[in-house]
Amino acid sequence: MHIQEFQEMMKKLYFHRDSARGVKGNYEWLMDEVKELGEALEGINKEATEKEFADVIAWLASLANVVGVDLEKAALKKYPNKCPKCQNAPCQCKF
Amino acid sequence: MHIQEFQEMMKKLYFHRDSARGVKGNYEWLMDEVKELGEALEGINKEATEKEFADVIAWLASLANVVGVDLEKAALKKYPNKCPKCQNAPCQCKF
């Protein structure tokens, strides 16, 4: 499924609720989900970890819906198949 | 672009670096990007906000690569076009 389609699906499912919650409220939910992902990554339950990955991308898409950002366009604008810093693929940045 | 293709692109660009950084290191980067998204959302610069959304999904995909999770599969397993809690589309959960 395209990133854009996933974001649209989230809109259909949750926009009535997410828009009422507002930007700050949605951001806080996203942050909570990222923390839950961190906790899952410390465990050994892969299915639980997968669910947390699902929640993070779902809340990221919901937040993008609330602020009117096209997540796929934004992602491909910054990452057009090459590193935005060194312009290489694979990245050759020195860290 | 499919979520899976985006994740593959991140793998091609960054896996050599991300795998060396490890799960904890990648998770910390993701968390930093989520915080930067929060800061951008407090401002009025839409382009800066879009870049932060791009970074969050990019680091989420990178982290998924490091732990061997298929982000698209995980997302669609939990969100198969209906709410995982109430099974409705749109969601009718009571909050």
Image (cartoon, coloured by chain):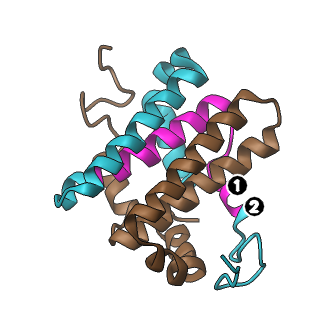
Chain colours: A cyan, B brown
Q: Position of residue A90 (x, y in %)?
A: 64, 85
Q: Nearer the viewer, residue B26 or A64?
A: B26
Residue B90 located left or right of residue A73: left
What residue appears at the point 44 percent right and 43 percent down from the top-left corner?
Answer: A58
Q: Which residue in the protein does label 2 denote?
A: A77
Report if the CB atoms under discs 1 and 2 are less than 8 Å apart.
yes
Q: Quadrant of the C terminus of chain A?
A: bottom right
SS category of the residue bearing label 1: helix
Q: Residue B90 lies in magenta, yes or no?
A: no
Q: Position of residue B2 (x, y in %)?
A: 52, 65
Q: Nearer the viewer, residue B93 or B88?
A: B93
Q: Position of residue B48 (x, y in %)?
A: 78, 45
Q: Which residue in the protein does label 1 denote?
A: A73
* Vertical relation: A60 (above or below) A16: below
Camera sees residue A61: yes
CA gap between label 1 and label 2 equals 6 Å
How dense is the environment of label 1, judged by Cα within 10 Å: few (below 14), some, or many (20 and up)?
A: some
Q: Which residues are drawn in magenta?
A: A50-76
- Count of numbered badges drawn on the protein: 2
Magenta portion: prevailing SS class? helix
Pinpoint the chain carrying mark 1: A
* Vertical relation: A83 (above or below) A10: below
